[in-house]
Amino acid sequence: MAGCNGVSHPPQDYVPGLMCIRDMDAAALEAMDMPFSTPSASGREMRLHAKMKTICQENREEYVRLALNHRLHEFDQQCSAVREGMGRVVPVPFLSLFTGPELETMVCGSPDIPLDLLKSVVTYKGIDGNAPLVRWFWDTLESFSNAERSLFLRFVWGRTRLPRTIADFRGRDFVFQVLDKYNPPDHYLPESYTCFFLLKMPRYSSHRILCEKLKYAVH
């Protein structure tokens, strides 16, 4: 299919269906009586031609071309709006200086969550930073997968990525607070206040309990 040659990442669940239509036996294609339309990303059926109602042997190549073209350009308007919005903050010609992943990191933060960066902005309340409970907490985060760390960030801050640098935190500290109001502590889950980047932790009796409770809370 010539239209796919320049597509680096065609929709993996879409193109095989078009290939099937292109290569299908003519009799089978006629028997299926498929409409000359394609589903949009929202699931709505989009007519691809005003006059062609069904796919047949004579128009199958045209159908494949139009269907792929629709999918490739379905979000052109939205992408244009995003580009215009970004251009109001950063001159568009400057954007070409960055790769896609670099620009994504600048706008959204890194998808990888470095704990050293998080440790550099933490403030402890109600506990010494060298206490065993603090060590258990960081050991637990070290054992988390990156996906689980994202869940943790969403739990404590309402976002799934960290800023790129300490300066990008704009003075916002991650507050780790231990309270003795939870009694007995092992019966309670951690609490969070996302507006304040605040984690309230019971004074758990062991690393295992802390790990179990934190995992349960973030999931």
Image (spheres, rainbow, N blue to C red):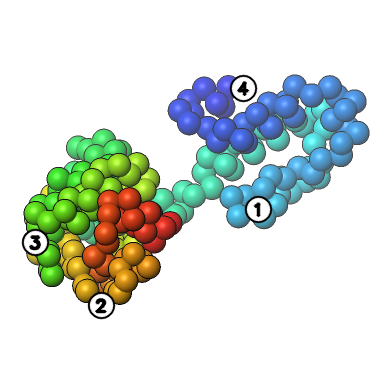
Quote the CA–CA distance across marks 2 and 4. Answer: 67 Å
Which residue has dot 1 on it?
43
Which residue has dot 2 on it?
181
Looking at the image, is mark 3 or mark 1 nearer the viewer? Answer: 3
Q: Can you say whether 136 is above or below 123 in the image?
A: above
Q: Residue at x 12, y 56 (%)?
A: 131
- Answer few, some or many: residues within 10 Å of disc 2's Cα (few below 14, many 20 plus, some between 14 and 19): few
Q: Nearer the viewer, residue 138 or 70?
A: 138
First in residue order: circle 4 vs circle 1 = 4
Quote the CA–CA distance across marks 3 and 1. Answer: 54 Å
Quote the CA–CA distance across marks 4 and 3. Answer: 65 Å
Element type where label 1 sits in the image? loop
Q: Residue at x 62, y 31 (%)?
A: 15
Which residue has dot 4 on it?
1
Mark 1: which amino acid? Gly
- Answer few, some or many: residues within 10 Å of disc 4's Cα (few below 14, many 20 plus, some between 14 and 19): few
Q: Circles 2 and 4: CB distance less than 8 Å?
A: no
Element type where label 2 sits in the image? loop
Q: Judge from the rendering whether residue 123 lies leftward or rightward of residue 77; answer left or right.
A: left
Mark 4: which amino acid? Met
Quote the CA–CA distance across marks 3 and 2. Answer: 18 Å
Q: Circles 3 and 2: CB distance less than 8 Å?
A: no
Quote the CA–CA distance across marks 2 and 1. Answer: 51 Å
Mark 2: which amino acid? Lys
First in residue order: circle 3 vs circle 1 = 1
Q: Position of residue 102 (x, y in %)?
A: 24, 39
Mark 3: which amino acid? Asp
Which residue has dot 3 on it?
128
Looking at the image, is mark 2 or mark 4 nearer the viewer? Answer: 2
First in residue order: circle 2 vs circle 4 = 4
Quote the CA–CA distance across marks 4 and 1. Answer: 24 Å
